[in-house]
Image (spheres, grey):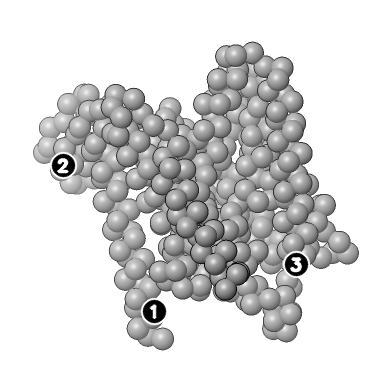
Amino acid sequence: MMLKREYSSVALLFLLGLLVVVGCFSLTFGQIDVPVQDAMAVVTQKLQLPLLQEVQVTKEQLAVIWYIRLPRMLVGMLVGGALGASGAVMQGIFSNPLADPGLIGISAGAATGAVLSIALGTATTSMFAMPAFAFCGSICAVCLTVFLAMRNGKIPVMTLLLAGVAVGMLLGAVTSGVLTFMNEQKLQQYLFWMVGGLDYRRWEHVYLAAGPVLGGICIMLLLARHLNILVLGETEAKAVGMPVVKFRMGLLFVSAMTTATSVCVSGNIGFVGLVIPHMMRMLLGPDHRVLLPASALGGAIFLVFCYSLGRIVMPPAEVRVGIMTALLGSPYFLYLLRKMQKSVFL
């Protein structure tokens, strides 16, 4: 037990160090390469830390690092951490490694909210209008899914899954219907958001996402032990006196709120909440007290790496991060699906 705990601690420290390395890579490389020392000097000087104060940086380096790359990198870390941790919770609730936060209609609700914001013209009035509409759409979709799945105060997992699929299809139809009445400019604006990306993210988006995402991840970590019991089954959870419905609902809404926040600031980014928790489970085991922080760190690493790679793979063009996560995540998903099919038939 002691060796396993030490291994988990070392693994989490390694992931934290890898996140720092990927963050430095993201700040350094791009259309304008900035030396690591200069990039760190910009950060420490703006934060007034007693480090690297003697390093001279140019106005161009200051603008690129502080106003462009750093806020985008931080948004990427927050979104990746939110999707990774929420994906681990969803896979635990559904007891299915193919589960992700989009199963209960979060992504479909966000898409409907975003398209309504564009259609009504509010998306051009304020940078917060579309994220607000997307967040409200996600929360409404989750509430509708839970309302349809609840029977006599209980929420069967399979019924919740089917209700989520039905709500997602319904909202997808609503979104498609609204799109048919939009002009070409608004269609492009919606497509730009739907692909998912970190471009044009600013410090305001960091402030918008930091509170809900960090708060949601902290709550998930506090409930990790209870999630371990829920995974054992409803009968076992009730045997130890756990109010199953309350904890399942609480975990569901916390993960939904965290995911909705990430989707509203970055658009629809797939595969992070699906692939990363499963990889962390294979490496570190099913204990959610370790799996949740590992998934959050892994999601942040994966998303920032995909964003950085998309910036340098086809210069001067930038491949959006939603495309990069799909390109890198879909092969692993197909492998996982193939592996599960073999286990079913053998």
Cα distance in 3D space between marks 3 and 2: 52 Å
Task: Report whether 233 appears left or right of 267.
Answer: right
Q: Residue at x 44, y 68 (%)?
A: 282
Q: In the rendered image, which quarter contains the C terminus?
A: bottom right
Q: Nearer the viewer, residue 127 or 344?
A: 344
What percent of the width, then of the height, locates residue 237? Answer: 69, 78
Q: Which residue is mark 2?
A: 37
- The numbered mark, 3 or 2, whose residue comes first in the sequence reads 2
> What's under tag 2, amino acid-wise?
Gln
Residue farthest along the right direction in this orientation: 152
Neighbour tally class for label 1: few under 14, some 14-19, many 20 plus, Cα within 10 Å = few
Q: Residue at x 60, y 14 (%)?
A: 184
> What's under tag 3, amino acid-wise?
Val
> What's under tag 1, amino acid-wise?
Arg
User: Which quarter of the figure has residue 108?
Assistant: top right
- Total tally of numbered discs in the picture: 3
- The numbered mark, 2 or 1, whose residue comes first in the sequence reads 1
User: Which quarter of the figure has residue 129?
Assistant: top right
Q: Which mark is residue 5?
A: 1
Q: Is residue 218 in view?
A: no
Vertical order, 131 against 217 (above or below): above
What SS does tag 1 mark?
helix
What percent of the width, then of the height, locates residue 127? Answer: 54, 25
User: Which marked residue is nearer to the observer: mark 2 or mark 1?
Assistant: 1
- The numbered mark, 1 or 3, whose residue comes first in the sequence reads 1
Cα distance in 3D space between marks 2 and 1: 35 Å
Task: Report whether 57 appears left or right of 7.
Answer: left
Cα distance in 3D space between marks 1 and 3: 30 Å
What percent of the width, then of the height, locates residue 198? Answer: 43, 34
Q: Nearer the viewer, residue 11 or 59?
A: 11
What SS does tag 2 mark?
helix
Q: Which residue is mark 3?
A: 245
